[in-house]
Amino acid sequence: MMEDESGAKDRARIARRAFLGGALTLGTFAATPHANLLAAAGGTAAMRGNWSSGYGLLRSARDANTGMHLLALPDGFTYRTFGWAGEAMTDGTPTPGRHDGMGVVRRRGNEILLVRNHEQTGDTGAFGPAEIQYDRVATGGTSTITFDLKSGLAGSASPSLAGTMQNCAGGVTPWGTWLSCEEWASNVGDTSEPLTQPHGFVFEVDPAGGPPRRLDDCGQFEHEAAAIDVATGDVYLTEDAEPRAGFYRMRPRAPGDLAQGGQLQMLGVVGRTDLRRGVPHGAKFKTRWLDIAEPTRVHTPGMVDARGVLGQGLDSGGAAFTRLEGCFATNRAVYFTSTDGGDAASGQVWMYVPRDEELHLVFESRSREQLNYPDNLCFSPRGSLVLCEDGNRAGGQYLFGLGKDNGLFAFARNQVVLDRPVLGHSGDFRRSEWTGTCFSPDGRWLFANVQAPGFSVAITGPWRRGLI
């Protein structure tokens, strides 16, 4: 894209050497699969609404940054907000809003680099310097933040990708970059926005900034999240579309160098083509993968094109899900969420096991009172899942843990009510979704975002094995 040939070749060599040489230190610390979930998902004990006491009752807690009571947490846990929308970054650019997916991409001693998506849509102009802009009028992108693991303080923040649309989730790579996924899919002229580039792609982001790297063979559709299987280099991708969506993988020609492209495929399930409702308890399915012939044949929402990526896959017998969002890979399994899947239309958690080519239903919410639309997720170094809620609870949305005892428990509640302006933000934000959960490499810090008014948070405390 906007990168000189020698720079692209150097980056490719470094990335491939890191991948093949085993320098997989970030994003893969959850090396042990969720053994109890794996066993339960294949037997009669598959979960449809078990509860766990978790870390206990949640109590209103004070933010170490603002002094305000923005979250409720279990006893012993503390937090600090940082990276608020509107704060000036290193180049003077105001931090964009609508914080979404986030990941730890690199570590330098006690300092880590977080890359954070901004799910903005609009045509008022790209932020940041020209060299990181893909489309000069689009307002989405990513920012990079430093964080000191010893002091617990965030440091500098800078733009790292701009000129994209509706950057939702994404995922880290083993070689220290970030995959940022556009949920907005269109070609130039398809919509009323005067966009100058096609959208609906995955971009590989250098946390230090640099030219946008568009990965065409990851497809052009309503992307949500990406996760890399470190054993093979395959990229797993979710699609946030309804009433039907697909689960995909891109098999790279050169593992560790995604710019060389590869083959996009959709997941198919043997003997079944619709997994949105009516999936029995304890369900597990054998799977197959179906090639997508035209990965950049976009299906624009509201426009019928049977040869779009989704249509190509479904026509070949691919499995239909609904609103696939979060995606996270360990060294043996890939977890993903269906936000409004299941009989109660309030959420499913799925697990794909590449070694066995099997798909398991890990959890299904019984009602929106229990778990109201799981979205982003991550795997804890203590062997459990963290689920971000994206529903509409009036009293505040939750971060949930799904523990090794296969029980769901509330870990944090959004209780953000700003009765005085903070960087120009005021009002009741308790219905705002949680996004961007990820852990520090040492497991001490859980990072997350509250999308509106837009801030990140670092949480620490008395973590325990078997919980998150």
Image (tube, rainbow, N blue to C red):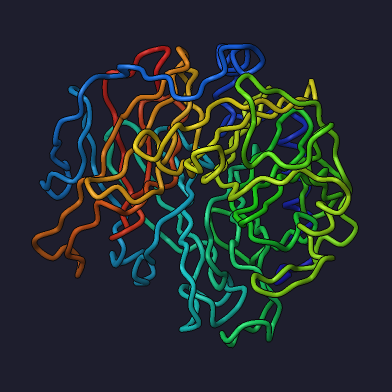
Residue 336 location (% of width, % of height) = 59, 37
The image shows residue 22 at horizontal and vertical percentages of 71, 27
* Residue in front for this viewpoint, 297 or 138: 297
Residue under the image location 85 percent in, 39 percent down: 289
**Is residue 89 visible in this depiction of the protein?**
yes
Q: Quadrant of residue 411?
A: top left
Quadrant into which the N terminus falls: bottom right
Q: Residue at x 38, y 49 (%)?
A: 391
Q: Quadrant of residue 451?
A: bottom left
Does 227 appear above or below 198?
above
Q: Which residue is found at the position 56% from the left and 47% from the top?
A: 325
Identify which residue is drawn at 47% across, 72% down. Answer: 128
Quadrant placement of the C terminus = top left
| Total tally of numbered discs in the picture | 0
On the image, the x and y values in percent for residue 362 come to 58, 25
In the rendered image, is residue 178 in sight? no
Name the side, left or right, on which 202 lies relative to 146. right
Q: Is residue 154 left or right of residue 122?
A: left
Q: Residue 360 at what x, y percent from top left? A: 67, 25
Position of 316 compared to 150: left or right? right
Viewer-proximal residue among 259 and 347: 347
Q: Between 160 and 307, which is closer to the camera in this rendering?
A: 307
Q: Nearer the viewer, residue 143 or 422?
A: 422
Q: Is residue 357 above or below residue 427?
A: above
- In the figure, is residue 108 to the left or right of 182? left
